[in-house]
Amino acid sequence: MLHLCTDDAELIAEATRIPRDALARAADDVLSDFIVETLRFVGPADIHNVPDIVGGRRAERSIFFDGAELKASLEGTHYYAGLTKLADLVALYEEYHDALFERNVRLYLHSEGQKGPGSHMRQTLREICDRRRADPLPPECFAMYHNGVTIHARQARVEGDRLLLKDPSVLNGCQTVKNSYFFVNDAAFAPHLDRDRWLAVAVPLRILVTNKDDLVRRVSASNNRQTEIRPSAFFANDPTQIALAQRFEDLAIFYERQQGAFKNRRQSQGNEFFDRYSNSLDAPITIEELAQSIAVAAERPALSVASKISQLFDDAQYRQLFGARRLEHLELLVFLRNVLRWMPTALSDLRSASATSKDALDKLPIGKFKYACARVVARHVVANRPSDVRHFGMQVIGTASRAKPMRGFLVQMLQGAHTNLYRLLPEVWRESPGVWRSPADASLLNSVLTDLGLERFDVFSSYAPNK
């Protein structure tokens, strides 16, 4: 979409977000046979550098299938169940890369790949495929030893012993597919790989064919409940999260709605990733960080709830936290994240600097007090210094080397000319030398907020970016 508007790109993106989302959904439904690119706006600064538009019909992808179509009662929905070849799923991954897991609740967890189920899976593959073994494991044993894979597709049809899919997406089985990919591409094991046995390895397969997004999200979440998973993961494919990821991408920030996505994309995309997410070079802003940052800055929930991520992702709490009003200004959300992330370091800096003072923050439990201090500082800055929100809210600060200005700013905000928390922390919360009252005590925190005129201050409705 070419336009001649000279407003800030973020303002344009926000003003057009709802119709853009509606158009994208409509295009995906009506033109299901065709490749539909995300709608992009090109303004005067880029009008002579319009990216190429790649079109055409969606190609079918073929995988081995030994199974049957199951009876379905939902109109427009089909199910298939049977076996496929692990090599065919790896081939899909080699074509789509991590986009194959776009609708999964999480991506490959590299830290888990060398232990637990990941290590057992690779051991099974070695026992099957190692040509040095005199008595190798039969290839069909893999299907009995390990869980299967669930795939969503826009369309599917059986042709002989092949299943032809349009827009395949792995809803469950990311760990299976990527562990297998790493196994078959292990250079050290390559001389010993019996390729015929590898090509014979089968895995259980279920296929969901539907255009009902709510059903896809529920299947993805339910399939992943069999293994330990963080509560936030079940909202990874919520439309609000998908829209947020696109809005953050427009600001060159990576929003990690799927656990493990940042590390996987950074490793697989290389320089392209850093060009696309130049304001998120060292770290993403994660769904959990965002939920907690919103909760800490908001009037509700109580700080005792905001400090516990597990309590922020029950359905009612989630809907409140991620309401449209709170998501209006992305730079405010990034600022709140940076404040909460670097508050412990700032408190540590302040504690060290006060070591010789009579008001020393001796034995202040920084990990507990970061939430109360972040709530106070966030409200103070939005109320009195909104220009600093944008200054510290346009980039995700991920490493200590990049955080020095942020740390200095937070220390300044904690001192007397601003929130006076340097004095109020020991005055309000210190019970005796080295002994501190609970920072989650609502009456104590409210007394500080009242003293600063911030008790009923709503950062989300009060923030004015042009003030």
Image (spheres, rainbow, N blue to C red):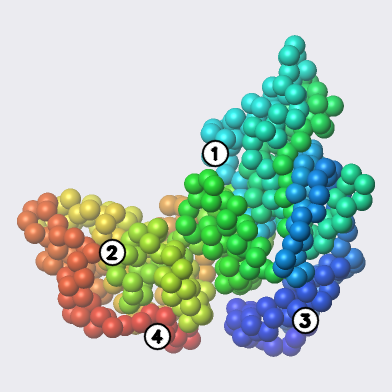
Q: Is residue 115 above or below residue 230?
A: above
Residue at numbered disc 4: 462
Mark 4 crowd level (few <14, some 14–19, many ≥20, 10 Å Cα) = few
Which residue sits furthest right? 160
Query: Label 2 vs label 1: CA separation?
Result: 31 Å
Work out how far the residue at label 1 is from the one at label 3, CA to CA, in angstroms.
43 Å
- Check contact, mark 2 vs mark 4: CB within 8 A: no
Q: Are marks 4 and 1 in contact (CB under 8 Å)?
A: no
Which residue corresponds to the image point at 70% horizontal and 35% vertical from the top-left?
143
> Residue 304 has which mark?
2
Q: Residue furthest left?
A: 432
User: Which amino acid type is marked by label 1?
Assistant: Glu
Task: List the residue tagged with mark 1.
Answer: 112
- Foreground label between 1 and 3: 1
Please give the residue where the numbered disc 3 appears in the rendered image.
1
**Foreground residue among 250 and 129:** 129
